[in-house]
Amino acid sequence: MLTRRHLLSAPALLAAKPHHQGNLSLNEDCNHFFVNRRKQRLTRESIRQWVDQYAATQVHDLILNVNAMRSSFPSQHREAWWTGFDPSGGPQQPFLQPLPASARQTWFEWIRCAWQMNEDKLDLFAIWIPEIRRQNMSPWISVRMNDLHEVDKEDHPMHSSFWRDNKQFRRVAYRNEQRDKAFDYSHKEVRDYNFRYIEEVCQRYDFDTLELDWMRFGFHFRPGHEDTKILTDYHIEVRKLLDTWQRKRKHKIGLAVRVPSTPRTAKRLGMDAEAWAHLGLVNYVTVTNFWRTVDNNMPIDQWRKLLPKTTTLAAGLELGCNAFPGSTATNNRPWQSNSLETSRASALAYLHMGANKIYLFNYMDSDTALDDNSKYSDLLRNLTDSTKPRRHIVTYQDTWAPGETPNHSLPVNLEANKYATFRLVTGPAAKAATIRLGLTNPDVKVRINNIETSPGKPIAPTHPGPNIPLHEFQSQFTQSTENVIEVAAQSPTRIEWVELSIG
Amino acid sequence: MLTRRHLLSAPALLAAKPHHQGNLSLNEDCNHFFVNRRKQRLTRESIRQWVDQYAATQVHDLILNVNAMRSSFPSQHREAWWTGFDPSGGPQQPFLQPLPASARQTWFEWIRCAWQMNEDKLDLFAIWIPEIRRQNMSPWISVRMNDLHEVDKEDHPMHSSFWRDNKQFRRVAYRNEQRDKAFDYSHKEVRDYNFRYIEEVCQRYDFDTLELDWMRFGFHFRPGHEDTKILTDYHIEVRKLLDTWQRKRKHKIGLAVRVPSTPRTAKRLGMDAEAWAHLGLVNYVTVTNFWRTVDNNMPIDQWRKLLPKTTTLAAGLELGCNAFPGSTATNNRPWQSNSLETSRASALAYLHMGANKIYLFNYMDSDTALDDNSKYSDLLRNLTDSTKPRRHIVTYQDTWAPGETPNHSLPVNLEANKYATFRLVTGPAAKAATIRLGLTNPDVKVRINNIETSPGKPIAPTHPGPNIPLHEFQSQFTQSTENVIEVAAQSPTRIEWVELSIG
């Protein structure tokens, strides 16, 4: 219930004292560290060292995700990764049987690594949090509110018994898609189950900001039952909890959220981040695609107007850079990551549109990482340097509310004498630009903002890029903020990639 | 140039004193009256009488459109309808030659009607304006800013010489589509040409509100050159002009605009109505589709948040009710109008989402009118009566900025065991609803908000409706604001119509 008393008791919040001027927030997921370090026996020092790579970079907020369905710390309220695991049972033990045979060795090792750490009385987050502060960054804890990894396998070792045993709380009973198996937050039991975990997180860890990650996986209600009041009330309770801990910890504690990329879709999925911010419950809002690709067309300028001026607005960048649903990447891959240059383009466009921060998700130091991970250090230091090269790529929105009609600009099959038009958000203006198109037939005429480019020429594949030939067109004219590219086919062609490259 | 002086000199505006509580604004276009009365010799009384049908209805604002490219009054700055017309020349005269032979008689008659009125020293708007006030409504003048009727025929009698003679001011030189032939407002000559006409309108007529109709036809810049500053500055100049006339007329004069249906598309087409309102230039904003259909999915709640509280927000309803681009209507027609019940549904949904007014465009008393025009009087009186029947129809957005990807929910071709989901904005909740689907194969299972409906049964064609068989499904459950309909195919089918009917 939202009462006047609640409103008055929620103090106007500021984010925790800024540690330095970096404008990046970076998420470290709940098991990546174990997976990557799975052959080691972790020590306080090897855990601590992970922080070093982010010190003195553009990263301001290091966001430590503590859970999927299970917990990365030994929780009193849900299973840890190693609950039910037999450290001496080897990779063929019953607990790991639901995994594909090829994955069992890896899973055995990383869960054993996590188990051993816990046996050794080491706590990942209790080590990282003070170290992050010591290195002048802000430590956050992020709780995933509805994780759905591997839900097509009911007995997968990632799952909680609460999920497995309470099918009556799932979102859609009559279908079998991944999203149907999410918890339905209209059930008090679901809300309470997660609230107890949040309470425990607050008790255990002294963080600057708590993030509720509603984009893992973004679906929290039955179709048509997305009553925004439910999650708004939930944030009132979480904010009250944080208020209590603020007094105990003697410092401000922020509340951050991750929500879908457009205000309308967010609300239609029951996540009214605008209301949460205007009620003073949430002080940091990240808007983001879900997973397969960065969304390079988010209405950040609109979010900026709809949120209070005091709310920090972060543009969420996913690691992937894929042009359309089902697109094939360079070298015939089903997925590809951004490069430093494509990430920079997204970041600069969104900062130009009014984002205060760039939030990097799945940009980790290994495994789930840039295809060319030798650039990681450069990315952390120079992501938003507008003097450096950037590549703006047409991608798509991957999260829509039930009943919204998903939309994507690519691919386009053009008949002769037909044309297609693309609009890219491109941030600060530049003197010149290169248009790159993935085309089955290069017989096209290209214009940027009404002005014809030079004729095209074939170029070698790029990373990221399409799995069909690329052609390059030069322009001496770009505009600030947005640029419009028109492609007119002289003979039939198919467009699978559209890019505006600067610098 | 926007200076502080300009800002200070634009007084905070209120709409003219309300005349009664009606929440409808209704547009009468610039030649409909002549066309419909073309066989008459107009008199002061026959002109005056037109107003009577709107008196004591829900219509608050009668919006008199004075021009397309040509003017309905004898302008000093552009051609009138009858400029170049020979009243004794008959339908085969050179002026009418560009028309199809079948249209010449009608055109000869209506232009002669307008010419004769002018010869008789009658001025349509000078008669209507005081009569509208006398009957307790608010008289507006609406100027179309970029009309494109018949531009595929360069020498059509609707065109101005300014348009015909100044191809260098057109929007796109290298293509031949209708929208390419619009004026490009980045040219000062174009802005000045229209400004002189606006000055003349202010001089001639004592109206309550001036409307600039930017949705006739909605495209005012070269692709990629939609610099919002240009039209924002234009509204500063128009507001200054109106301030002058306010002092002379000794009453407030409002400034209203018609813009595209979403804030993002509007801005991307160079029409930043949010800025115009926040700068105090515009006090009434209508958001609307362009023409072929009402858009039943406009983000009115978002507009309400983005505009100042003092701005009147009108949801613009077009006359058409067509389900998707290229859809075929009941009885194999290419176009159909709304009915009273479908218009009511749109109106109630939008009032529920925060619209202050409903703006009816092309809802005239004849010709361009409801398919069942016997309901016109009822519509004017009971459009927003929530106790009466209403039919919510899935339609589509028809205006997109260059480079945006047009999106529409229908048609859907479903394979067996696949499903489609639709979301309708439906206003106040109701106890029960009827779902109507246009289906090539009725072998479907239907859910509303996750709950199964009764099995379907075939029904007779409706108006409006699809040109394929309709099937009806009963539900005892609806929600307020939005409802989600899921259609699961047992065997292959095609969906061309989705409707939620209440009452």
Image (cartoon, coloured by chain):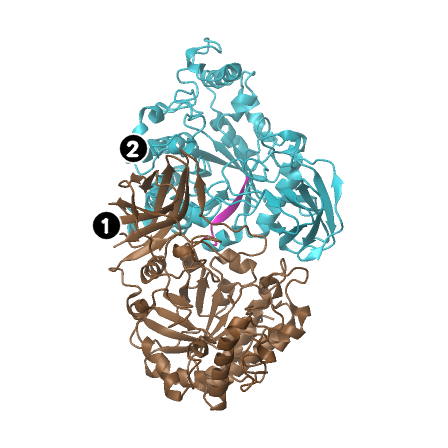
Chain colours: A cyan, B brown
Looking at the image, residue A382 lies above or below residue A175: below
Mark 1 belongs to chain: B
Q: Are marks 2 and 1 on the same chain?
A: no
What element does badge 2 sit on? helix
Q: Which residues are magenta?
A: A307-317
What is the number of the mark on residue A173? none
The residue that label 1 is drawn on is B431
What is the x, y in percent for residue B137? 35, 78
**The disc numbered 2 marks a residue on which chain?**
A
Residue A288 sits above or below residue A421 on the image: above
Task: Tell me the SS state at disc 1.
Answer: loop
Q: Name the quadrant containing residue B371.
A: bottom left
Amino acid type shown at disc 1 = Lys
Q: Nearer the viewer, residue B455 or A322?
A: B455
Whether residue A106 is situated above or below residue B388 in the rendered picture: above
Q: Which residue is mark 2?
A: A189
- Left or right placement of residue B451 versus residue A433 in this view: left
